[in-house]
Amino acid sequence: MTKRVRLLYVVARDRPDLKERLTAAFLDTDNVEVIVDRRTTRTADRGSKVDRERRLMDRDSDLAALGWIPHSEAGGRLARHPPRPRRDRIPAMTSGPMHAQVLHEWGGEVRYETVARPSVVAGEVLIEVEACSVGLTVLNYMSGNHSRRPEDLPRIPGHEIVGRVIATGDGVSSPRVGERVLTHFYLFCGACDLCHLGHEPLCRNLAGQVGVARDGGYAEYVALPARNCIAVPDGVSPIAATAIPDAIATPLHVSRRAAIAPSDSVMVIGAAGGVGIHMVQMARVFGGTVIGIDRGEERLKLVREMGAVAAFDSSVPDAAQPVRHLAPRGVTVAVDLVGNPATLRFCLDALAPRGRLVVLTTFPGLATEVAPRELVARELAILGSRYASRWELGEAARLVAERRITPVVTEVVPLAEVGSLHAKLRGGRLLGRGAVVPAGAAARSPA
Ligand SMILES: [Zn+2]
């Protein structure tokens, strides 16, 4: 039921302290209807008719801006004096040069350069980057596996971004200046039916990805739509938070797609990689028993440490044998993070009756043969999983804050040295995720 509140505007206007308290009391409260008492205002507003009209206009603008009365109720007066959406003052640091790693050709390597800082426009925020994740997804996009549009170059890559908001454009009420945020990878519209349903990666008006269709986080500053920002919970460091937007949120989406439950045995291919090592942990959070597949004892050891009951080397002859030994009836869920014909076949062969295969790593032109009879005979399901929703990023952050998921970021280097991490990734020598830190951020936070 709506509660009606009669507001004595004159009192509120002449007592700024009271006005603030009223604002705090009402703005965040549902079911409160504020009624402006015009008789009180008229009594107080002495002077000519023109003066009185102007004061009423100012008053209605103020009230509408505060959210106390809907704009439509303020009538024609507001049409002449529309309230401007809140815009935070932009500090001097939003203009000038910045350092960034810039990609000049698809398939090439980035170059450390000095470029202009991005400017902030309506609906967007300017973020001072504290750290940005480095993983295979960035390399996949840099190689042109997903888009090779010449108009997208030169480009600053990097999509798992953590930083402080230092300026907001017109119309942005959240996030606020000073907030630490992490960012959604996809440039979704936020207005179509699929966005409204929380399927942002399937947005009908998708404008591409951060770090591909617009500049990303291999830089000291990045400008992005406000709707791409999610608050970083207290107690989560910027470095740890870089794993959340993709490496942790993606496994959350996979786990929900596959409906992983306590009776499930989950096999993860590529289990020590950036997404894999968090997939191992996430499947456990959902109650599954995890078998990890990767290469090399150091990587397999990490997979076991992160909660897998067993980890096997895919490079040995008949790598399927130990999996069959451990799960004689087959695994109920297989997650393929490698995505080549051999791993897809490995997964299909390992599935138990009614098993689910989740695919999410793709390469152009790469396919595998699946006979419908094979799917029917064992009632297998193959599920595509595309990134994660905005809501899932928030949930992934919560799981990290609650220490139910441990971000595995094993190497952190200055932004200028990102090439060394790229080389390790290409050689399969990076455990979990890496991260880069811009020089300015490193200076502010020596730890
Ligand atoms: Zn949309």
Image (cartoon, rainbow, N blue to C red):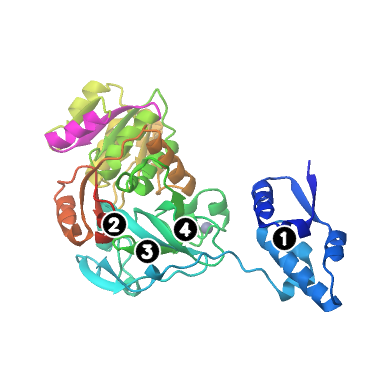
Label 2: element kind: helix
Q: Which mark is residue 441?
A: 2
- For label 4, the crowd category at 10 Å Cα-Cα, with few meaning under 14, some 14 to 19 and many 20 or more, is some
The amino acid on which the numbered mark 1 sits, given as a three-letter code, is Arg
- Confirm or deny contact between disc 4 and disc 2 (CB under 8 A): no
Residue under label 3, please give it: 222
Q: Position of residue 197 (x, y in %)?
A: 56, 48
Q: Earlier in the sequence, mark 4 or mark 2?
A: 4
Q: Secondary structure at mark 4?
A: loop
Q: Which residues are magenta?
A: 286-306
Q: What residue is drawn where x is 77% and y is 52%?
A: 34
Q: Which residue is mark 1?
A: 13
Coordinates of residue 169 in the picture (x, y in percent): 50, 66
Q: Is 123 situated left or right of 12 in this image? A: left
Closer to the observer: label 3 or label 4? 4
Question: Is 123 located above or below residue 68 in the figure?
Answer: below
Q: Does the magenta run of residues contain 365?
A: no
**Residue 115 placement (x, y as % from top left):** 29, 73
**Callout 3 crowding tier (Cα within 10 Å): few <14, some 14–19, many ≥20:** many
Q: Amino acid at mark 2?
A: Ala
Say which label, 3 or 4, has the lower sequence index: 4
